[in-house]
Image (cartoon, rainbow, N blue to C red):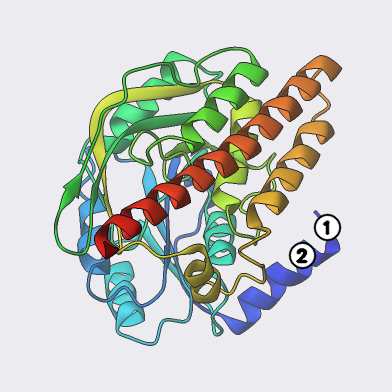
Amino acid sequence: MKNTDKNTTAILCEVGDLIMEKNTNTTNSPLVSICIPVFNEEKDIERTITNVLTQTYDNFEVVISDNASTDQTGKICKELAEKDSRVKYFRSSETCNQNENFNRVFKFSKGQFTLWLGGHDWLDEHYIKQCIAKFEENPEYVLVTTYKKHIDDDGAEHYEEYKGTRLDSKSPYKRFSRMLWFLTQSYLYIGPVCSMMRRSALEKTSIIKNILFGDRIISLEMSLLGPWGHVPKCLHYRKNPTFTTSKQYIKNYGLEQSPFLCKVRMCLEVTKIVWRKDFLKFHEKLFCTLALIRYYFRYHFTRTISKFENTFKIGNYSD
């Protein structure tokens, strides 16, 4: 571990108000960690935690990292932690950006398998049990996905089951290329960051980088590390806020980045990750890089066409 990581962890422990159950016997470490990064989630957080606690699988913990909420989120979480020893609550004294809070809650967890869960999302009661069963089918799986249903602020449901090729190939390049393809398709098809991951694989990544599209970067890195399993059932429900632009996202989450260069930086970061993977052969690194370049230009081509279509529609309305 780098000194900076040690210092960061030390500072977080000193400035944060740590509330945990007294029993911290590491011999009874949970197999699964449900990691919930929260900020001002008083409206939904009790439902989310209570829902997780009804899982039909027993050996898990719920780890909450409160990003210095200013509403009743902390009070609600503390009360739930006092009632159930599976709930561990950590609070930071200062607000950081969203990506940092995702990384922090992972560091506080202990499970061999990890799921990041939004403070306003919920799970089918059999989610953990069925994901663990899929991991047990193939010890090479580093991540297991399920179908997800998205609900927006107005209560409208958005759901689609993609039944085509996923990321179960043994070839790192084929998985990487497939993940790039998913990034050009509907967000309803796949959601790697909010899927269950094997901790030993996740620890080999840079976790979620503090830049826009950090979730895409870690998804691509996980695709290189091993095949993914899939449970073809809707077991995860996500409450999505109304759409925000890249510029709004950067402002809301404190990401120091120009929205005009975000895609360039994402591709550069992924390229560096690819060429640092010693287990990849030279030709695999080259193929991944070419696939990434193709993805970048496809993204800009699609975006240009979309802008042209919008301009054309506006022109029609103005006639």
Q: Residue 179: x and y, percent?
A: 54, 30
User: Of the numbered discs in the image, which one, if any, rests on residue 6?
Assistant: 2
Q: Label 1 is placed on what type of residue? A: Lys
Q: Residue at x 53, y 18 (%)?
A: 139
**Secondary structure category for the residue under label 2:** helix
The answer to whether residue 115 is above or below residue 142 is below
Say which quadrant the C terminus sits in.
Answer: bottom left
The answer to whether residue 118 is above or below residue 157 is below
Where, by quadrant of the figure, is residue 205 drawn? top right
Please state if 284 lies on the left or on the right of 145 as rendered. right
**Secondary structure category for the residue under label 1:** loop
- Could you give the CA–CA distance between mark 2 and mark 1, rounded to whole angstroms? 7 Å
Q: Residue 186: x and y, percent?
A: 37, 38
Work out which residue is located at the far left of the displayed protein and give it.
Answer: 155
> Is residue 200 at least partly visible in the picture?
no
Please state if 10 lies on the left or on the right of 123 as rendered. right
Neighbor class of circle 1 (other Cα within 10 Å; few <14, some 14-19, many 20+) is few
Residue at which label 1 appears: 2
Q: Label 2 is placed on what type of residue? A: Lys
The answer to whether residue 292 is above or below residue 99 is above
Toward the viewer: 206 or 255? 255
> Is residue 37 at least partly visible in the picture?
yes
The answer to whether residue 296 is above or below residue 313 is above
Please state if 1 lies on the left or on the right of 253 as rendered. right
Q: Residue 298: x and y, percent?
A: 58, 35
Work out which residue is located at the far bottom of the displayed protein and give it.
Answer: 70
Tell me if label 2 and label 1 are in contact, CB under 8 Å.
yes
Toward the viewer: 240 or 199? 240
